[in-house]
Image: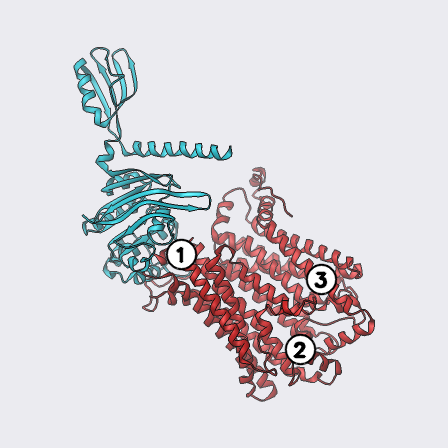
Amino acid sequence: MTTAALPAPVRTATATRGDGFAGTGALLRLALRRDRIVATVWILLFVVMAASSAAASQSLFTTVESRMRAAAAVNGTPATLALYGRVFDPTSLGAVSMFKLGAMGAALVALVAIFTVVRHTRSEEESGRLEMIGATVVGRYAALTAALLLAVGTTVVLALLTALVLAGSGLPAAGALAFGLSWAGAGIAFAAVGAVTAQVTESARTANGLGAAVLAAAYLLRAAGDATGVDTSTWLSWLSPIGWAQQVRPFAGDRWWVLAYLVVFAVLVSLGAYALVARRDLGAGLLAQRPGRPAATPRLATPLALAVRLHRGALTGWLVGVALGGLVLGSIASQVGDFIDTPQARDMIMKLGGERGLTDAFLSAEMGILGLIVSAYGISAAMRLRAEETAGRLEPMLATHTSRVRWAWSHVAVALAGTTVLMVAVGLFAGFAHGAAVGDYGQIGRVVVAALVQLPAVWVLTGITVAVFGLAPGLIMAGWGALTVFLVLGQLGSVLGLPQWLMDLSPFTHSPKLPGGTLSAMPLVSLTVIAAVLLIVGMWGFRRRDIG
Amino acid sequence: MTTAISVSGLVKTFGQTCALDGLDLTVDTGEVHGFLGPNGAGKSTTIRVLLGLLRADAGEATLLGGDPWADATNLHRRLAYVPGDVSLWPNLSGGEVIDLLGRLRGGLDPKRRTDLLERFDLDPTKKGRTYSKGNRQKVALVAALSSDVELLVLDEPTSGLDPLMEAVFQDCINEERERGRTVLLSSHILAEVESLCDRVSIIRLGRTVETGTLSELRHLTRTSISAELAAPPNGLADHAGVHDLKISGNQVKFDVDTKELDAVLRRLTDVGVRSLTSQPPTLEELFLRHYESDLAGETARHAAVTR
């Protein structure tokens, strides 16, 4: 895992055979060398998350009765089913303890796998480093193979360590292994998805975004399948690799054969990626380049116009994604009311903070999740500041009559306006779908407000990214780190048994729970002020520091 | 004569590395000034300080009469910059980049833009990611040269250009000079510097080691002499300015400092010259001498570090 060896010179003998895989070993060693810290941190993060979840839940559910009660509440509440999935065996300690980490954890492992594969394929190609390596004795498939081996290896190590700590915490060993392997299966399946998206687009950023979109679609499919099924998941869940990972049912039957779905999926999708590699030129994507304009339109005359132009494509993609997500979740919300008659469900509503009914509670929880997702857009848009700087495109801009603050503000403005547009779209589409289902379009306004109150928390994350950019640009990834921490605090904090003051650190804890909850101005104003201060601090730091 | 760029005692350190160590540079208005030095000597760092991208740790820098850090935005209206490694936005066409940079600088001359695109044989419809290195360089050159500015700051602007385009570039710079513009040209191509520059500054290890006009610098070079004399020479060995003397019978071979050339030739004709060949001084030798001593200094420094 942490080998420090640099790639040895590749044997020339392998080249003479025209072997497309020549040099894979050397590239794999190089990838391990580059990722030795990042991969270790990721693995430990997941293992610790699983271990602390198991430890915290086991003390909560000591009796079979307590487990059955909790499982009934979960399985009777579509909102929880959509978010986390089903408890397949209400009597099983493992199934009840780990249900929140099953699908959610699998999706996070899958996300890391996508990023890993893209980082070692398309990013390398885009930067031109792969061209340098490709001129040595390295086969056409070597980079892709090395990236896939790295991603698969990382997820398998992660799975085995997770299984080990779960078994060590007193859960059944077989279930622990099934749990770990369900994570690994999702990781391997989406490593293959990342391999394909890396071939399709010319930019690593788009490849990551496309992979994440596929993952989001898979998560939504299983959310719809789990939430709409009575006593079991519907066929929709079986269209999703994340759904398959859940259907392994760790601690609740350990259905090993479902893992084969994931492996077969991964193999088939990877073969697709290899077929694409064989058919395209180095550096090219699938879509041919069209010639551009010989001259700029009159509008392209300010830093802001340039920023809008640079962010346009990604923002459009995000808009389509959140609109679809809003539609799906809005239409599910109307079916949630059917389950209102169980006392366990009522219990769950109160826990979720809903007062006006299960549907409101569900919508409110979904808006929280979508707020987190949209803040990822805010972070990535703000990180463009650093990307422009390191790519050397900032210097020529600043050598013109453009001040640092004006330039930085152009990207920040797009991040702030873009997140606003996205949350409005979330509210409109979810509200429309929900309104159509219940035959009351007056719902649209309520849902749009529920979406908009998430914005100040979203802007705090943009602010954190900009502050890091201004003060310590080398640590720009801290933006993602903050999002991960807030995600863990908000979605898993109660499962992990974290103290309230720690969960209060997440801005999303303070967002009003709408619709249904009370709308108070205080948290919204405070969060907006915090975001503004972070932005100003970032600008202040950026004005004073060296460029490059 | 006014001064466009005036730098004295400039110091800039990055952590442990000292990039600029008391650098001096003066560029007069209207001249083309060559800025030379081996890789890592501090050329780009100096230019970045002059552009207000880096803040100097010590020393004075004045650019077009202003402070390059504090007045950066306003000064940049009056200058154009071409980096040595141009990076373009992948999804913007070359034409769009030229227009954008020109407008951000305060406007560009459309006639000159068309003319330059043709002379540099550049297709403005291609997207940034599809340009080769040389073509990316051309995009930045066209953007800079078609802007109406007083000062051109060029950091190895011709890296990646083919010889034909190199000639076009030299023509363009000569036209700029005729229009009275000031050019700071950092370069490794000595032929380019010899044909374009009025004055030259050579830096190494963050310090200026030589500065002056080309003819002044030529005086610092040596001429190689090889001659057959009527009789064995005498007194040549301890004559000032004579180096690497080799005598075999009536044959002599040596290098002589250009400023001692006259005196040494008199000494030879006193003896009687049968035949004589001389190699004229080249700037290349001068540069190499500085570059090589830099290399030696670098090695010594590394040795000191490893110890």
Q: Look at the image and tell me whether residue B302 can be seen.
A: yes
Q: Earlier in the sequence, mark 3 or mark 1?
A: 3
- For mark 3, what is the residue? A52
Discs 3/1, front = 3
Q: Is residue A464 left or right of residue A258?
A: left
Instruction: Check the residue under mark 2 and report the chain it is in.
Output: A
- For mark 1, what is the residue? A393
Q: Which is nearer the eye, B223 or A146?
A: B223
Could you tell me which secondary element the residue under label 2 belongs to?
helix
Q: Looking at the image, which residue is at 76% across and 61% down?
A: A256
Q: Earlier in the sequence, mark 2 or mark 1?
A: 2
In percent of width and height, residue A422 lies at 51, 73
Could you tell me which secondary element the residue under label 3 belongs to?
helix
Which disc number belongs to residue A352? 2
In percent of width and height, residue B280 lies at 24, 28
User: Same chain, marks 3 and 1?
Assistant: yes
Tell me the kind of residue under disc 3. Ser
In percent of width and height, residue A355 lies at 65, 84
Q: Is residue A183 left or right of residue A15?
A: right
Q: Looking at the image, which residue is at 74% across and 75% down?
A: A232
Instruction: Check the residue under mark 3 and report the chain it is in.
Output: A
User: Same chain, marks 2 and 3?
Assistant: yes
Q: Are marks 3 and 1 in contact (CB under 8 Å)?
A: no
Instruction: Give the colour chain B carries in the figure.
Output: cyan
